[in-house]
Image (cartoon, helix red, strand yellow):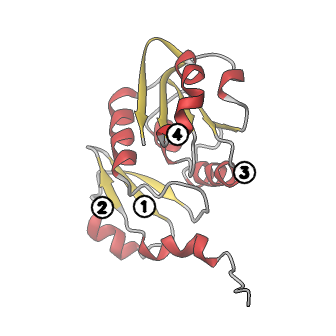
Amino acid sequence: EALAVGDEWLDAWQAHAVAVEVGVHLAVVPTWLDPAAVEAVVGPDRLRLALPPHRAFGTGAHPTTHLALEALERRVGPATAVLDVGCGSGLLAVAAARLGAARVQAVDVDPEALRATVATAGANGVAAVVEVSDVPVADLPGRADVVVANMELAHLRPVLGAVVARLRPGGCLVLTG
């Protein structure tokens, strides 16, 4: 007998999500959490990155995400162009925009990731800065000052040459996953 399985498991992670401080200035705050619980964890001086519910990869809780956020915190400022390859939930792209990047490109092949990134950018008021696309990395125009890819090596390896080619000379390449 076949067992019918719905897609509720895709949302199960939300019950375990918590607000978390990252680096010196950032905090990841799932939007559905009780504000009092968030205030107990996140200092008032933190730049809060709102994370709406989604079904894409990326909750902000993984150590590799923290490393990428910390690198962005050190490298992104006004006039910085950033490329987030394999954007997932859009958290890294949104962090770059909230940190003052002038332009942020966020690319992914997963339609759920593209929807999540648009929602995350909107929830953080940076939709005008974050350009979300499914264009292959090799076909993207221009170069970025900071290129970040928080993804497993098996997914990164096939596009690594194109990822490196998107980096401006003297730029910063952040690879985690």
Q: Position of residue 109 (x, y in %)?
A: 69, 42
State which quarter of the image contains the N terminus. bottom right
- Secondary structure of the residue carrying tag 2 is loop
Mark 4 is on which residue type? Ala
Mark 1 is on which residue type? Val
- Graded by Cα atoms within 10 Å as few (under 14), some (14 to 19) or many (20 or more), the crowding at tag 3 reads few
The residue furthest bottom is 1
Label for residue 111?
Answer: 3
Q: CA distance from mark 1 to mark 4?
A: 29 Å
* Res 129 visible: no
Q: Which residue is mark 1?
A: 29
Work out whether mark 1 precedes mark 2 in sequence or the reverse, and give the earlier one. 1
Q: Which residue is mark 4?
A: 154
Work out whether mark 3 precedes mark 2 in sequence or the reverse, and give the earlier one. 2
Mark 2 is on which residue type? Val
Work out whether mark 2 precedes mark 4 in sequence or the reverse, and give the earlier one. 2
Q: CA distance from mark 3 to mark 1?
A: 23 Å
> Do tag 3 and tag 2 residues touch (Cβ < 8 Å)?
no
Mark 3 is on which residue type? Pro
Q: Residue at 65%, 27% (x, y): give it.
A: 137
Q: Which residue is mark 2?
A: 42
Question: Mark 1 or mark 4, which is nearer to you?
Answer: 4
Q: CA distance from mark 3 to mark 2?
A: 31 Å
- Secondary structure of the residue carrying tag 4 is helix
35 or 69: nearer the viewer:
69
Q: Quadrant of residue 155?
A: top right
> Do tag 3 and tag 1 residues touch (Cβ < 8 Å)?
no
- Secondary structure of the residue carrying tag 1 is strand
- Secondary structure of the residue carrying tag 3 is helix
